Image (cartoon, grey):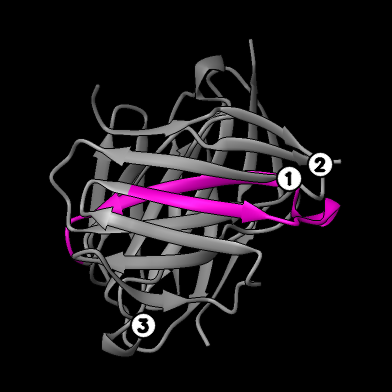
Amino acid sequence: ETGVTQTPRHLVMGMTNKKSLKCEQHLGHNAMYWYKQSAKKPLELMFVYNFKEQTENNSVPSRFSPECPNSSHLFLHLHTLQPEDSALYLCASSQARREQFFGPGTRLTVL
Amino acid sequence: EDQVTQSPEALRLQEGESSSLNCSYTVSGLRGLFWYRQDPGKGPEFLFTLYSAGEEKEKERLKATLTKKESFLHITAPKPEDSATYLCAVQGGETSGSRLTFGEGTQLTVNP
């Protein structure tokens, strides 16, 4: 594996389900990010982790819960989501504040 | 608050017809301006980083330039495979951390 990988690529869930998105970076970076991309809207930063420590939470609802067990892995735990949470969820990594490299994304549909 | 505005929203070109995409920004202490390319259903692909006014970078048919208020992505003799959404993002000074503020993108279609 190279670059940034994300699983699953597609996810359909009901509003009462609990699911998790996984991201892994193979670039040796020390920062990881979660973004949300909705149609006709700019990418929205959700969370930032530097050296496994959360350094930014962009007013994200508590139904989204991030976890960063080490500098290579990042999870986004989802529970009791709403239909408006349907979007493309993108993971990215960077070395400090340099350019960010993105994964392919998880297309999430909440029914 | 950092802001990025990209224009036009959509652009249709004929193969070989050169043009430019615009990214206007306001930021407190620009640390870097980034260009990405995004294909449908995929994550953004990094193209360029520009750090200071007057800087230029090139890659194949693409050339990015930067002034104190805006950046241009010039596309010379485009091909159909250049069709994608092009995203611009800025990173501000120390108080912004590693946050990137993105524009809404320009959707480019190049017809054969």
What kind of element bears circle 3? Answer: helix
Asked if badges 2 and 1 are on one and the same chain, I answer yes
Q: CA distance from mark 2 to mark 3?
A: 36 Å
- Label 3 lies in what chain? B
Secondary structure type for disc 2: loop
Tell me which amino acid carries mark 1. Answer: Asn
Disc 2 to disc 1: CB gap under 8 Å? yes
Specify few, some or many for label 2: CA neighbours under 10 Å numbering under 14, 14-19, or 20 or more.
Answer: some
Query: Which chain is disc 1 placed on?
Result: A
List the residue tagged with mark 2: A14
Label drawn at residue B96: 3
**x then y, percent, for residue B108:** 63, 34
B25 on left or right of A5: right
Q: Is residue A79 magenta?
A: yes
Q: Main secondary structure of the magenta part?
A: strand
The chain letter for the residue carrying disc 2 is: A
- Residue A28 sits in which quadrant? top left
Residue A17: assigned label: 1
Q: Relative to the observer, which residue lies in front, B83 or B95?
A: B95
Q: Quadrant of the C terminus of chain A?
A: top right
Q: CA distance from mark 3 to mark 1?
A: 35 Å
Dot 3 and dot 1 residues touching (CB under 8 Å): no
Real-space Cα distance between discs 2 and 1? 5 Å
Q: Is residue A61 magenta?
A: no
**Residue B79 visible in the displayed image:** no
- Point out the stretch of residues depicted in magenta: A74-96
